[in-house]
């Protein structure tokens, strides 16, 4: 029978995981139990995705506000400038609260008209009307309020982030400034903590070149345990989320080891060689308000070797409309299948690959998994993707 389905994606329900649980066994059991219940088979090169929080919770990878404050005190001795954080209660509020606990004064610099994820502090049209030049103008909190009002709500959450962040101060020790040039911070203090995610390396280089006394990033804090806490040697506090009112969950560590163990366990249990990745935020952008989802430092902090690289695809509709324009029906389908079989190892750059997606496989698959599992109450922290590496020529 002619195959009628290509890629399928299943959200796999799993038990609520706790610190110390056998993550590998839970993942393997959840997938195989779903296979038995839903009557489907596993194939070689199917992909199992596991949410980063599932892994981090099993690892017990948490830190307290006191742990963060201790890490800050270890690196800074005076007033500090915190540059360009994400506007997020989940991602940054707890970190800012801990920083404010640890130093005398925090000069908090916010990018405008929006942070690097697209979360706005002001309407861009209103900014233009005021005559502000975002490349050079620096706004105090007082000037910001004069121009944009006492309440500037986020379009999704309704939170006024300038007010929210100011309210996390310890005895009023947070000063908020809106600016886009990182060197402006050096007029306030030479001790800098960069809080941006994807632009952090550039921000650090600019500040060091400008003569900053100390420059660290969130990725430099909690790279090792503090008083027995969790840690992440590669990303530090980047990728963390609020856990409780006094703690945050870090991005999982040892991702490569985790996915390799799951891959081996699935092979032993099912005889199938699957690929495995850990995924966090997907790499996509909201079309309504322009907010980019990827607040984690990477989409996937761990994946098996078979997920390295980019897709190797050619564009069916380009071939159909050009090289095979004169064919119809079954003859055209067979001709297209033959072209797919004969494609080179890397067709990117050729006309027949125009419009394909040359993004990294972990980013594509991680985004697919994130959209499937969501971030709320679906209860499917494991995602099974089948047929992703098949093409139109496979029966």
Image: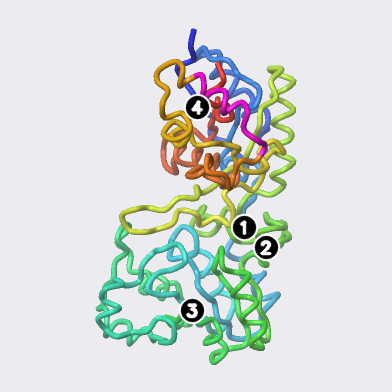
CA separation, marks 4 and 3? 46 Å
Viewer-side label of 1, 2: 2
Q: Position of residue 27 (x, y in %)?
A: 62, 29
- In this rendering, the answer to whether 150 lies above or below 288 is below
Say whether disc 4 or disc 1 marks the residue closer to the N-terminus: 4
Say whether disc 2 or disc 4 marks the residue closer to the N-terminus: 4
Determine which residue is flagged by label 4. 7
Q: Residue at x 60, y 19 (%)?
A: 42
Looking at the rendered structure, the secondary structure element under dot 3 is strand
Q: Residues within 10 Å of mark 2 (few under 14, many from 20)?
A: many
- In this rendering, the answer to whether 383 lies above or below 294 is above
On the image, which quarter does residue 386 sit in? top right
Q: Residue at x 44, y 57 (%)?
A: 292
Q: Are marks 1 and 2 in contact (CB under 8 Å)?
A: yes
CA separation, marks 1 and 2? 8 Å
CA separation, marks 4 and 1? 39 Å
Q: Position of residue 302 (x, y in %)?
A: 67, 44
Say whether disc 4 or disc 3 marks the residue closer to the N-terminus: 4
Say whether disc 1 or disc 2 marks the residue closer to the N-terminus: 1
Q: Residues within 10 Å of mark 1 (few under 14, many from 20)?
A: many
CA separation, marks 3 and 2? 21 Å
Looking at the rendered structure, the secondary structure element under dot 4 is loop
Determine which residue is flagged by label 3. 108
The boundaries of the magenta stretch are: 334-345
Q: Which mark is residue 378?
A: none
Q: Is residue 344 magenta?
A: yes
Determine which residue is flagged by label 2. 222
């Amino acid at each position: 029978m002619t195959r009628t389905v290509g890629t399928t994606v299943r959200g796999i329900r799993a038990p609520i995981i706790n610190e110390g649980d056998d993550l590998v066994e839970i993942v393997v059991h959840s997938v195989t139990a779903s296979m038995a219940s839903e009557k489907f088979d596993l194939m070689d090169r199917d992909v199992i995705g596991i949410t980063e929080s599932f892994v981090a919770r099993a690892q017990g990878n948490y830190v307290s506000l006191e742990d963060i404050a201790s890490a800050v005190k270890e690196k800074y001795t005076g007033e500090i400038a915190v540059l360009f954080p994400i506007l997020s209660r989940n991602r940054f509020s707890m970190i800012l609260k801990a920083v404010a606990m640890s130093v005398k004064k925090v000069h908090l610099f916010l990018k405008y008209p929006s942070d690097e994820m697209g979360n706005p502090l002001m309407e861009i049209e209103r900014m233009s009307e005021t005559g502000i030049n975002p490349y050079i103008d620096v706004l105090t909190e007082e000037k910001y309020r004069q121009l944009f009002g006492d309440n500037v709500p986020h379009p999704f959450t309704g939170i006024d982030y300038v007010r929210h962040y100011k309210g996390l101060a310890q005895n009023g020790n947070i000063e908020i400034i809106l600016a886009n040039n990182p060197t402006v911070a050096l007029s306030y203090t030479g001790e800098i903590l960069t809080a941006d995610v994807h632009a952090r390396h550039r921000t650090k280089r600019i500040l060091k070149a400008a003569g900053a006394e100390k420059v660290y990033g969130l990725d430099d804090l909690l790279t090792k345990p503090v008083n027995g806490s969790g840690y992440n040697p590669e990303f530090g506090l980047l990728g963390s989320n609020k856990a409780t009112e006094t703690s945050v969950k870090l991005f999982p560590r040892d991702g490569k080891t985790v996915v390799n163990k799951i891959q081996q366990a699935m092979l032993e249990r099912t005889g199938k060689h699957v690929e495995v990745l850990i995924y966090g935020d997907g790499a996509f952008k909201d079309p309504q308000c322009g907010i980019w989802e990827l607040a984690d430092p990477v989409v996937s902090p761990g994946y098996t070797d078979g997920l390295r690289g980019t897709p190797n695809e050619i564009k069916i509709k380009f071939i159909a409309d050009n090289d095979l324009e004169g064919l119809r029906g079954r003859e055209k389908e067979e001709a297209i299948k033959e072209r797919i079989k004969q494609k080179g190892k890397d067709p990117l750059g050729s006309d027949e690959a125009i419009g394909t997606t040359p993004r990294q496989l972990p980013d594509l698959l991680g985004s697919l998994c994130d959209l499937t599992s969501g971030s709320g109450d679906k209860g499917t922290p494991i995602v099974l993707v089948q047929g992703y590496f098949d093409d139109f020529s496979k029966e």
